[in-house]
Image (tube, rainbow, N blue to C red):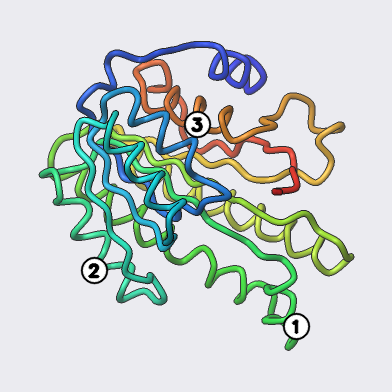
Amino acid sequence: MLTSVLEGSVSVGPYPELAGKRVLVTGLELQAGVDVARAFAEQGCRIVLHTTASGAEADAVLEMLAQTASELQVYSDPLTDIESATRFAQTAAKTFSGVDAVVNLIHLDLKALTAEALDGDFEAAIARRLQTARVITRIAANRMRLTWCEGSIFNVLVSTPPQTKAETILLSMARAMLASMTRSEASEWADQAIRINAVAPVLDSAEAGACLVSEPQVAALAMFLTSSQGRDLSGLVFDLGLVEHA
């Protein structure tokens, strides 16, 4: 089933039904997230965007999104802890009087994460990386519930390729923890018709079979899951092949 979903999501579109949908995209960086935000903007969605990227290139990206999105609201305050993530999520969920879809980009720098976890508590270090997405997922899902919205939440784990055994273990643990979070949240909100899925790097894409290999494919899957075609899919973690960023 996952193979057919992946094949369908990268070939089907556009989605006229997404025009005007309220989409929250968090964690956009110049190296990851631009294609996702652009895909929804080109469908005429109303976009709430969180990014800390700055400079001329970031300004050009925002201008591009503003030209195609129905509306665009940008936030840039750092999300450094649960409190700041909570404040942002509450504000974002109300920006357009609700939210229909969320895409959280979760960035893992495995080298930095390894250094952070020198005391051996890898699980705690990974949990800190996932906490912003977890907070936004819960607050957005609750807002969807309150506004009777059949919504989609899609958490995207973006990672540097592992270079050491420790980094390989970290990435494997991060994927497992994201999968556990996805299943738990999907079960929690299933009776509200709120779907929660994720995508994460797979260590051996050759053995994994069909997997996403580029950000445009991740963007296509995000739109597929947001559309009526993805209505029956929840609690899934899709595979993403590891690709070096330039």
Contact? badges 2 and 1 (CB < 8 Å): no
Q: Which residue is mark 2?
A: 87
Q: Earlier in the sequence, mark 1 or mark 3?
A: 1
Q: Which residue is mark 1?
A: 120
Image coordinates for residue 67, horizontal then vertical, percent:
27, 32
Image coordinates for residue 6, horizontal then vertical, percent:
61, 21
**Left or right: 154, with 69 as reference point:** right
Residue drawn at point x = 61 percent, y = 51 percent: 158
In the image, 128 versus 48, the foreground residue is: 48
Q: Which mark is residue 182?
A: none
Q: Nearer the viewer, mark 1 or mark 3?
A: 3
Residue drawn at point x = 59 percent, y = 49 percent: 179
In the image, 56 versus 4, the foreground residue is: 56
Residue at the front extreme, as displayed:
56
Residue drawn at point x = 52 percent, y = 51 percent: 30
Q: Nearer the viewer, mark 2 or mark 3?
A: 3
Local packing at callout 3 (Cα closer than 10 Å; few below 14, some 14-19, many 20+) is many
Q: What whole-number distance in Å separates the C-alpha atoms at marks 1 and 3?
A: 35 Å
Image coordinates for residue 102, horizontal then vertical, percent:
35, 43
Residue at the right extreme, as displayed:
165
